[in-house]
């Protein structure tokens, strides 16, 4: 699939919507995900005079998520569903179920696991639209560019920037930021603060994430978000994060020869992605793996900012053969989970794979 074809497919899907259709948006419960959803929401409302009837923030760790989505799609009679910033093509069976009830468009920048393209599903991955690594063409920028071809979404350019920061790709999109900053009379710091507020909300108050999406789709400037009630979560989260970041050297398990570090953190907050993002910004040429457990599951996130190790491959291989193990993501950022009983096996697998050199990105 080339870029022109993908854009044609996108337009075809949008043309298939009328004001008679009920639309829904399923988006990843993270900053890039909700920013993507806000841009899609805004566009649909503008194009059809009718807001999406169903919004759902998807968490990879929620084993009931697919059932919940299917039930709501049926109940709310959703006939057009947008799935944003989720590697949903790992779950072809679920898509087959959904296709019985609605037409689907999947817009995402994770690597391609399975091509879902069918008469009912429009499948758009970043790699159809760009030659750069797909992790860099974040979904909120994809949505901004795609929807710009059918509607005026310029009001939400700052939301796209916020999603880009959430997926740590400011450097890739510097000139886009310069334009937005000049046009909206913004400061980069306001966009960074916005990304932090959204991230904090996803962790401390996920039950408010759908209303955050509704808020963002009509917010014309980051100050609206910064002055809102959502702002309160930021300070609480960042205090905790900084504590973990500052004890990284002392508390983590280090494998300097492999440039590999395991760091298990204990917190009631689901904070591992935030912690690993911050640490990996400090040590860009190291493979950092932060682990966090609840009663049953051990979750982990891997980061490597210099692209020398494929984190997605590393974790996918490491959970192979571990029953119930899951993993996926991008080259610089991936995540997964196994049952707590398999911690030792998981770490041994990771060390073995790194030593073998097979996860090297050549
Ligand atoms: Mn993303």
Image (spheres, helix red, strand yellow):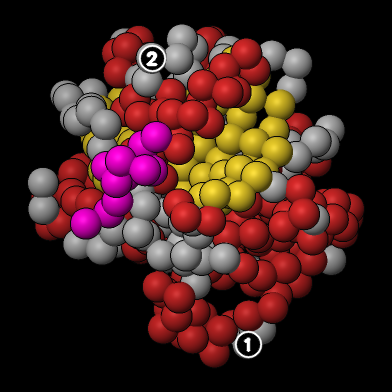
* Horizontal relation, residue 211 to residue 177: left or right: right
Could you tell me which residue is drawn at 66 percent across and 84 percent down? 187
Q: Nearer the viewer, residue 55 or 232?
A: 232
Could you tell me which residue is drawn at 84 percent across and 55 percent down? 243
| Disc 2 element | loop
Tell me, yes or no, if residue 22 can be seen here.
no
* Position in image of residue 291 (x %, y %): 65, 36
* Horizontal relation, residue 252 to residue 353: left or right: right
Q: Name the residue under label 1.
A: 185
Q: Splitting the image into 4 quarters, where does residue 117 fall?
A: top left
- The question of residue 183 being in magenta is answered with no
Could you tell me which residue is drawn at 49 percent across and 72 percent down? 170
* Position in image of residue 208 (x %, y %): 76, 38
| Disc 1 element | loop
Q: Mark 2 points at which residue?
A: 321
Kindly identify which numbered label has been placed on residue 25: none
* Horizontal relation, residue 236 to residue 187: left or right: right
């Amino acid at each position: 699939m080339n870029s022109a074809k993908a854009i044609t497919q996108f337009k075809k899907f949008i043309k298939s919507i009328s004001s008679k259709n009920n639309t829904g948006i399923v988006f990843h419960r993270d900053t890039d995900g909700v920013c993507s959803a806000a841009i899609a929401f805004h566009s649909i409302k503008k194009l059809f005079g009718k807001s999406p009837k169903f919004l759902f923030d998807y968490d990879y760790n929620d084993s009931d998520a697919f059932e919940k989505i299917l039930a709501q799609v049926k109940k709310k009679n959703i006939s057009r569903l947008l799935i944003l910033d989720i590697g949903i093509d790992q779950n072809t069976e679920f898509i087959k179920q959904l296709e019985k009830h609605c037409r689907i468009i999947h817009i995402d920048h994770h690597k391609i696991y399975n091509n879902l393209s069918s008469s009912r599903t429009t499948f758009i991955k970043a790699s159809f639209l760009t030659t750069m690594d797909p992790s860099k063409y974040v979904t909120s920028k994809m949505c901004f560019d795609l929807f710009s071809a059918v509607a005026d979404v310029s009001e939400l350019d700052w939301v796209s920037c916020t999603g880009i920061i959430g997926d740590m790709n400011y450097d890739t999109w510097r000139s886009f930021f310069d334009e937005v900053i000049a046009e909206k009379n913004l400061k980069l710091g306001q966009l960074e603060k916005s990304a932090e507020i959204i991230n904090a909300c996803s962790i401390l108050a996920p039950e408010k994430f759908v209303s955050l999406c509704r808020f963002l789709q009509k917010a014309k400037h980051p100050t609206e978000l910064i002055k809102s009630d959502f702002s309160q979560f930021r300070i609480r989260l960042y205090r905790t994060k900084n504590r973990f970041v500052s004890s990284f050297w002392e508390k983590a398990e280090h494998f300097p020869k492999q440039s590999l570090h395991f760091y298990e953190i204990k917190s009631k907050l689901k904070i591992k992605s935030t912690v690993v993002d911050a640490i990996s910004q400090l040590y860009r040429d190291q493979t950092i793996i932060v682990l966090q457990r609840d009663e049953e599951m051990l979750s982990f996130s891997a980061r490597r900012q210099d692209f020398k190790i494929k984190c997605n491959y590393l974790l996918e291989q490491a959970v192979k053969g571990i029953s119930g193990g899951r993993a996926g993501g991008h080259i610089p950022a991936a995540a997964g989970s196994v049952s707590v009983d398999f911690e030792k096996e998981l770490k041994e697998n990771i060390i073995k794979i790194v030593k073998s050199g097979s996860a090297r990105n050549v």
